Every structure is written in structure tokens, then in C-alpha cells.
């Protein structure tokens, strides 16, 4: 309550008293020594003291240490230096209740001089609740910060997990791809194996039908000749005996030829065929072959050999080239009628040699030409001519080994020309 001694004018005092008493903040008036001269009801309620307990006492009773012990120094300092640390500025202080408990308060101090005497008024606002709210806000803020940190960490972990899962997924996709490729490769291999098995089966059946067909005639001819020979017992029948012996010989030779072809094929297929390279004159080989094929020629057939260049040396497998040419020449003879010419020409081309064998025989039907050289294949117009369909296949394999090439040109009913090209020097 305001001190009436300080206010000689009663009206002023009453107004002031009503203002001070209705204020919700604590209001205190002290002298420069810190003595409490006045306190309003809000002030006594704030500190838990009665007005009587407060009036006349030093204001430091309302403060905890260290302010309690230094309060008088604060006022002295101000009075000496004039430097304001709180007056007119206001600050947050700790208040001490009668029961010793502390509370935060906002303190505004002003200085007033009445009739030459200096006084200080202090207005105190209990900010316990505000502080609690502030603390709650700080706590909430901290919680929020923590929860943002937690969530970010959680999110980061989830992102890491996602990345890891993605990587795992990529790895498993790669794995699946490789499995798929392996499966495709296996499927391809299976397909190939199946195709090979089919090819083998078809070869087997073609072989069976070829052998039964090709072996039947010479075997029955051998059988009939042998049983006839036993009947020709007289000396006069010597010529008949010799004829049948020749028939047997020729049949055996024919069968032997087929067997040689089989053996050659097996050797090539099993990779046992290795060319034996030597140098020789190609025309010498032709002369030998001309002599060897004389017996095969039909009536009035003629084999003409032409050399474009004399003394042509070749480095290759002589025996194999002989077999190739023998095969082509015997075919030309076999598939030509009596009286027809067979022309063999040798010609050098850059570092190779070209040999052509041209006949005027039955030719190869256009629709069969693409199959020529396949194992056991025989053209439709050659069914009645003995043969196995192996010769050209063997020729192709031999040429492949010697790095040579085969081509042909044929017209059904007009004739065929087979051309081979061989390198002059065989390279391993
Ligand atoms: P073969 O003569 O034993 O049947 P080849 O493999 O030597 O076997 O010949 C395959 C097929 O090619 C023959 O059956 C024949 O139809 C055809 N052929 C080969 N050479 C000639 C040729 N000079 N004239 C016509 N057809 C030929």
C-alpha cells in the first residue's frame, strides 16, 4: 500500500493507491538504502509476506544469494557512477518467497525524486508460467528436433535399405539373366544334339538302304559266277571260267572300292586324316591317272588331258589329290554314255592350280544341284547307275583339309564340269 507520508495531497494519494492496489504485478518502493517503504497487495501475495513483515525491511529479503548480498552495492554503484544496469531497462530476476522457494520474475525499476529525496520503484511480474511455457516450447522444440533427427535417421536407414534391396534386385536380375543365357545355351546345345541325332539317324537309314542296294548286285553276281564256275569243268570251258573269274574280281573290286570309301570317311570324321605333303609334278599324276582309268572307259569313250603349262610343281598330298581326281574322273566316265569325250584341263592361277573335268554325260537336274556333295546323296537321274553318294562328300572333305575348293556347272542331258582349285603350296 502507498505510503501516505510521501503524498501530502490526499486526492493524489487515493488515486495512486487505487491504481497500485488494483495492479496485478507486485509494486515496491524502496529508498537508496534498500529499505522497503511501500508494497502493494500483489507484492505481498507474490512473496508470501504480510505488509508489516515487508515494510521497513531491506528489499534483499526478497532475493536469493548472490543478489541478496550485493543489492546495496548495486544501488551504491549506480548512485556513484550513474551507469544503469537495471533502472529503466528491466530484467529477469529470481524472487525469494517467505518460505524460501524461488520464482522467476520480470523486474522493471524506475527512479523517482520527491522533494530532493531519491526513491526507487520496482514492478515485479511473476513469470513462472511464462517460463514453464517457454520451457515447454524449448522441450517441444528439442523433441521436435530429436524427432526430425530420428525420422531423418529412420528415413536414411529406409533409403539405405531400399538401395540395398535395389542392389540385391539388380544382382538377382543379373543372376537370372545369366541363368536365362545358360538355359538358352543349353537349349541351343540340345537343339544341336537333337539335330545331330536326327542327322545320324537319317545317315544310318541312308547307309542301310545304300549298302543293301549296292552290295546286293555284286554279291549276287559273285554267287552266281562262283556256282557257274563249278559247272565249267572241261578244258573247252576255260574261256567261260575266266569270264566268271573276271566278273567275281570286278565285283570284289567294286565292293572293295565302297569299303575304301567308308574307311576314308571314318578316318576323316574321326580326325585321323593327316595330309602327307611332298613336291610333285601335277602332269605326272595326270598321266598315271589316265592309265588307271583306261579300264573304266566305256566303248569309244575318250579321256583327253590338257596341260596349259608344262612342269607345274605342286606341294601337297599326292595320294589325296590322286583320289580326288580319280573320283571326279570315274564319275565323269560313269555318268557319260559310250562314245563321249571327257576333257581334263590343268591351268595355273596366281598361286593356285585349277583342274577342270568336263563331260558330256547325263548332267545333274537343277533341283538336285544344291544337295550335291551331301553324304549319300544321289541325283534323281542317277538311280539306275551304281553308286553310293559318298565320293563327292569325301572329295569335299579332302579338299577342305588341303585348303582347296570345289565347284561345278551342270545341265541335265548336256554334261557337267567339275572344277577344283588347290594352293600350289600347302600351308599347315
Ligand atoms: P556316286 O557316284 O557313288 O553316287 P558321288 O558322291 O560321287 O557318288 O556323286 C554323288 C551324285 O552326284 C551322283 O550320284 C550323281 O547323281 C551326281 N554326279 C556326280 N558326278 C556326276 C557327273 N559327272 N555327272 C552327272 N552326275 C554326277
Image (cartoon, helix red, strand yellow):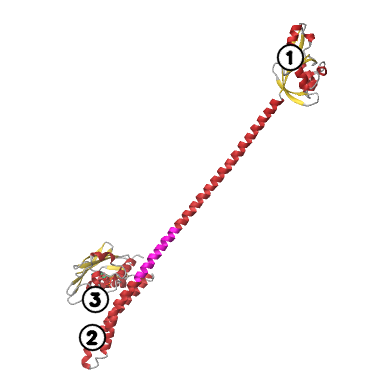
Q: Quadrant of the C terminus?
A: bottom left
Q: Going 62% across and 39% down the picture, which residue do you hit?
A: 150
Q: Among all residues in the image, which is located at the extreme bottom?
A: 234
Q: Which residue is mark 1?
A: 20
Any part of residue 354 in sight: no
Look at the image and say whether residue 186 sits in the magenta stretch.
yes
Q: Is residue 320 left or right of residue 187?
A: left
| Whole-percent x, y for residue 316 in the image | 32, 69
The quarter of the image that holds ligand 1 is bottom left
| Magenta stretch, overall SS | helix
Q: Is residue 90 left or right of residue 352?
A: right
Q: Going 20% across and 76% down the picture, which residue do you hit?
A: 298
* Residue situated in front as seen by the camera: 8 or 21: 21
Which range of residues does the magenta coloring cover?
A: 183-203
Distance from mark 1 CB to nearest ligand 1 atom below 8 Å: no
Crowd class of label 3 (few under 14; some 14 to 19; many from 20; radius 10 Å)? some
| Whole-percent x, y for residue 19 in the image | 72, 13
Any part of residue 298 in sight: yes
* Residue situated in front as seen by the camera: 143 or 372: 143
Look at the image and say whether residue 329 sits in the magenta stretch.
no
Q: Pointers 3 and 2 in contact (CB under 8 A)?
A: no
The CA distance from mark 1 to mark 3 is 151 Å
| Whole-percent x, y for residue 246 in the image | 25, 84
| Whole-percent x, y for residue 237 in the image | 22, 91
Image quarter for residue 47? top right
* Circle on res. 293: 3
Q: Going 52% across and 48% down the picture, which residue do you hit?
A: 167
Q: Which residue is mark 2?
A: 243
Placement of 40 over or under 163, stated as above or below:
above
Q: Among all residues in the image, which is located at the extreme top?
A: 9
Q: Marks 1 and 3: which is nearer the front?
A: 1
Amino acid at each position: 500500500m502507498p505510503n501516505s507520508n510521501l503524498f501530502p495531497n490526499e486526492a493524489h494519494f487515493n488515486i495512486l493507491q487505487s491504481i497500485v492496489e488494483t495492479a496485478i504485478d507486485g509494486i515496491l518502493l524502496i529508498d537508496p538504502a534498500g529499505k522497503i517503504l511501500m508494497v502493494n497487495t500483489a507484492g505481498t501475495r507474490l512473496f508470501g509476506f504480510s505488509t508489516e513483515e515487508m515494510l521497513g525491511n531491506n528489499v534483499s529479503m526478497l532475493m536469493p544469494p548472490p543478489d541478496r548480498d550485493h543489492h546495496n552495492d548495486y544501488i551504491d554503484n549506480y548512485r556513484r557512477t550513474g551507469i544503469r544496469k537495471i533502472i529503466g531497462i528491466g530484467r529477469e530476476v529470481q524472487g525469494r518467497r517467505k518460505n524460501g522457494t524461488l520464482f522467476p520474475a520480470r523486474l522493471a525499476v524506475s527512479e523517482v525524486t520527491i522533494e530532493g529525496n531519491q526513491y526507487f520503484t520496482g514492478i515485479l511480474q511473476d513469470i513462472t508460467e511464462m517460463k514453464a511455457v517457454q520451457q515447454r516450447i524449448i522441450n517441444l522444440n528439442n523433441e521436435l528436433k530429436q524427432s526430425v533427427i530420428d525420422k531423418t535417421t529412420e528415413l536414411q536407414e529406409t533409403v539405405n535399405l531400399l538401395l540395398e534391396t535395389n542392389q540385391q534386385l539388380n544382382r538377382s536380375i543379373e543372376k537370372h539373366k545369366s541363368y536365362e543365357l545358360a538355359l538358352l545355351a543349353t537349349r541351343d546345345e540340345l537343339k544341336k544334339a537333337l539335330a545331330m541325332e536326327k542327322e545320324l539317324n537319317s545317315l544310318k537309314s541312308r547307309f542301310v538302304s545304300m549298302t543293301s542296294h549296292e552290295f546286293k548286285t555284286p554279291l549276287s553276281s559273285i554267287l552266281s559266277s562262283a556256282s557257274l564256275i563249278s559247272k565249267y569243268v572241261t578244258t573247252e570251258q576255260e574261256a567261260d571260267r575266266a569270264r566268271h573269274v573276271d566278273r567275281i574280281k570286278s565285283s570284289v573290286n567294286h565292293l572293295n572300292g565302297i569299303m575304301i570309301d567308308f574307311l576314308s570317311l571314318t578316318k576323316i570324321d574321326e580326325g585321323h586324316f593327316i595330309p602327307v605333303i611332298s613336291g610333285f609334278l601335277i602332269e605326272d599324276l595326270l598321266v598315271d591317272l589316265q592309265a588307271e582309268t583306261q579300264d573304266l572307259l566305256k566303248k569309244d569313250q575318250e579321256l583327253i588331258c590338257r596341260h596349259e603349262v608344262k612342269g607345274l610343281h605342286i606341294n601337297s598330298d599326292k595320294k589325296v589329290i590322286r583320289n580326288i581326281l580319280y573320283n571326279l574322273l570315274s564319275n565323269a566316265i560313269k555318268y557319260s554314255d559310250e562314245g563321249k569325250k571327257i576333257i581334263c584341263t590343268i591351268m595355273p592361277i596366281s598361286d593356285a592350280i585349277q583342274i577342270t573335268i568336263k563331260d558330256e554325260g547325263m548332267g545333274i537336274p537343277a533341283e538336285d544341284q544344291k544337295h550335291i556333295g551331301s553324304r549319300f546323296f544321289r541325283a534323281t537321274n542317277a538311280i539306275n547307275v551304281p553308286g553310293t553318294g559318298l565320293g563327292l562328300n569325301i572329295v569335299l572333305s579332302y579338299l577342305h583339309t588341303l585348303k582347296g575348293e570345289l565347284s561345278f556347272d551342270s545341265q541335265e542331258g548336256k554334261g557337267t564340269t567339275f572344277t577344283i582349285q588347290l594352293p600350289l603350296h600347302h600351308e599347315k
